[in-house]
Amino acid sequence: MKIKVLLVDDHLLVMLGIQQLLEKEADLEVVNTICHPARLEGEIIKHNPDVIVMDIRMKNDNGIEWTKKITETYPTCKVVILSGYDYDEYIHAAYEAGAYAFVTKENSAFELANAIRQSHLGIKSFPADRLSNYHPPLTNVELKILQFISEDRTNAEISELLNISKRTVEHHVSSILRKLDVDSRVGAVVKAMKLGILE
C-alpha cells in the first residue's frame, strides 16, 4: 500500500519539483497538487490522503490555521509543514497546530520523504534541539482545569465548576497532556509544578 500524499503550495514550480522528487519514491503516491487551500477540503474528501504536505505561508492563506482545521476535522490526515524559513516561532506554531513534521525547503527530498513516512506512522519529526526546552503555553481555561486536577477533582466535577460539558473538559485535559508531553493527569501536575506553572 502506497502512502497517499496531497501537496498544497501556491508556488507552482516549487510544488511540481517536490511532486517529481516524491514520485521517485516507490512507497509514495502524490494523489494531487493544489495551489489554493480553498479546494483542500474537497480534495481530502475525494482522495482521502494519508499525509498532506503544506506550505506554511501562502499569499492569502496561513498553513498553520489550515493545519489546525485539518487536525480537528480530519484527524486521520497527518500534516507535514513545509517552510522556506526555519524560524523557531514557525517550528513551535507548526507543533502547536498539530502538525507531525516540519521540513524546510532547503532540506533534501530524502528528508521530506522520510518525514512523510514517519508522520504516516504517527511519529512526529521536528528539529529536536529546537523543541527540547519548548512547552506550548497553556490557555487560561487549561490552567484552571490543571489547577482543579491538582485538587483531585474529576472531569464531571470540573465540568460543573466551569459550566462546560464533560466532553469539553476531556478535550482540554488531552490538550494539557499533549502540551506538557506527559501521559497521565498525575504526570501533568508533577510536570507543571516542575515548570513552575502550578504552585
Image: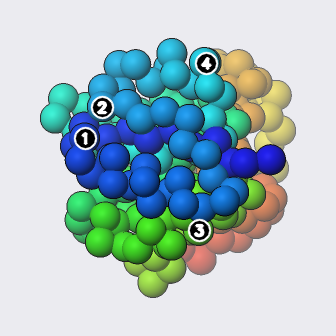
Mark positioned earlier in the residue sequence (3 or 1) = 1
The residue wearing badge 3 is 114
Mark positioned earlier in the residue sequence (3 or 2) = 2
Mark positioned earlier in the residue sequence (2 or 4) = 2
Between the C-alphas of marks 3 and 2, the distance is: 23 Å
Are the residues at dot 4 and dot 1 in contact (C-beta closer than 8 Å)? no
Where on the picture, by quarter, is residue 193?
A: bottom right
Mark positioned earlier in the residue sequence (4 or 1) = 1
Between the C-alphas of marks 3 and 1, the distance is: 22 Å
Q: Nearer the viewer, residue 11 or 66?
A: 11
The residue wearing badge 1 is 12
The residue wearing badge 4 is 45
Camera-near label (4 vs 1) is: 1
Residue 61 visible at all = yes
Between the C-alphas of marks 4 and 1, the distance is: 22 Å
Q: Which amino acid type is shown beneath numbered disc 2?
A: Cys
Q: Where 100 falls versus 131 (above or below)?
A: above
Q: Which amino acid type is shown beneath numbered disc 1?
A: Leu
Where on the picture, by quarter, is residue 109?
A: bottom left
The residue wearing badge 2 is 35
Q: Which amino acid type is shown beneath numbered disc 3?
A: Asn
Q: How many marks do you count on the picture? A: 4
Q: Is 36 positioned to the left or the right of 134 in the image?
A: left
Which mark is on residue 184?
Answer: none
Residue occupying the point 45% across, 60% down = 21
Question: Helix, strand, or loop for circle 1?
Answer: helix
Residue occupying the point 46% across, 76% down = 127
